[in-house]
Amino acid sequence: MEIKNVPQDGISTFAGGRKAMYATDDEGKYGVVASSGWEVEEEATKQALHELERLADEAYEAVREGQMSPLYYHMYAQRMDLIVLSQSVGMFQWRIKRHFKPSVFNRLSDTLLGRYSEALGLSVDALKQLPEKESV
């Protein structure tokens, strides 16, 4: 992309910020250019966030009905999926899926709960509970 074509749409998802993009100058040399975003990028980001909110709402109901552990809800509420959570805590996905079962989750050690709470930015006590619906 040429420097003159770097998007400068001032999208809302950047919140006034900018990101670095590589573009070529008139001589064809690459350089870093600040971009205020592209409308298509904004729409894609909003759709992704909407999908994570929908998944968090579904997870909330699954936890409330006792089908899944609170870990399942908090993963989506913190805008993560199984892959990201797995990478964040350094565990295999199959192991985390096992921890989504309430009977398994309730027996987890404090050390393991601490790894999850650190990755999700929650206290261990908050990790064990489902928040009130108003704060979801």
Image (tube, helix red, strand yellow):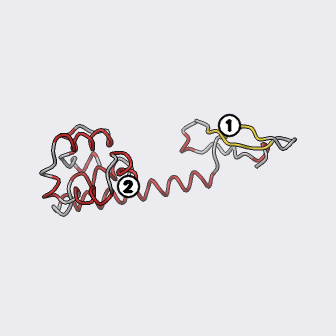
In the displayed structure, 101 sits above or below 128; it is below
> Mark 2 or mark 1, which is nearer to you?
2
Q: 123 left or right of 84?
A: left
Q: Is residue 51 left or right of residue 15?
A: left
Task: Read off the residue under disc 1.
Answer: 34
Q: Marks 2 and 1: CB-CB under 8 Å?
A: no
Q: Quadrant of residue 23?
A: top right
Q: Secondary structure at mark 1?
A: strand
* Kind of residue indicated by mark 2: Asp
The residues tagged by marks 2 and 1 sit, at their Cα atoms, a distance apart of: 30 Å
Say left or right for 73 vs 105: right
Please state which of residues 10 and 25 is positioned toward the viewer in this rendering. Answer: 25
Instruction: Name the residue tied to disc 2.
Output: 81
Q: Residue at x 64, y 49 (%)?
A: 38
Where residue 98 appears, x then y in whole percent?
Answer: 23, 59
Considering depth in this image, is 117 or 12 the residue closer to the camera? 117
Q: Residue at x 67, y 45 (%)?
A: 9
Q: Residue at x 79, y 46 (%)?
A: 2
The vertical placement of 48 against 8, above or below, is below
Q: Earlier in the sequence, mark 2 or mark 1?
A: 1
Amino acid carrying label 1: it is: Ala
- Check the image and report above or below for 115 versus 55: above
Q: Looking at the rendered structure, which numbered label has been put on residue 66?
A: none
Q: Is residue 61 above or below residue 42?
A: below
Q: Position of residue 84 (x, y in %)?
A: 40, 51
The one of 132 and 95 positioned closer to us in this rendering: 95
Q: Residue 54 at x, y = what percent?
A: 37, 59
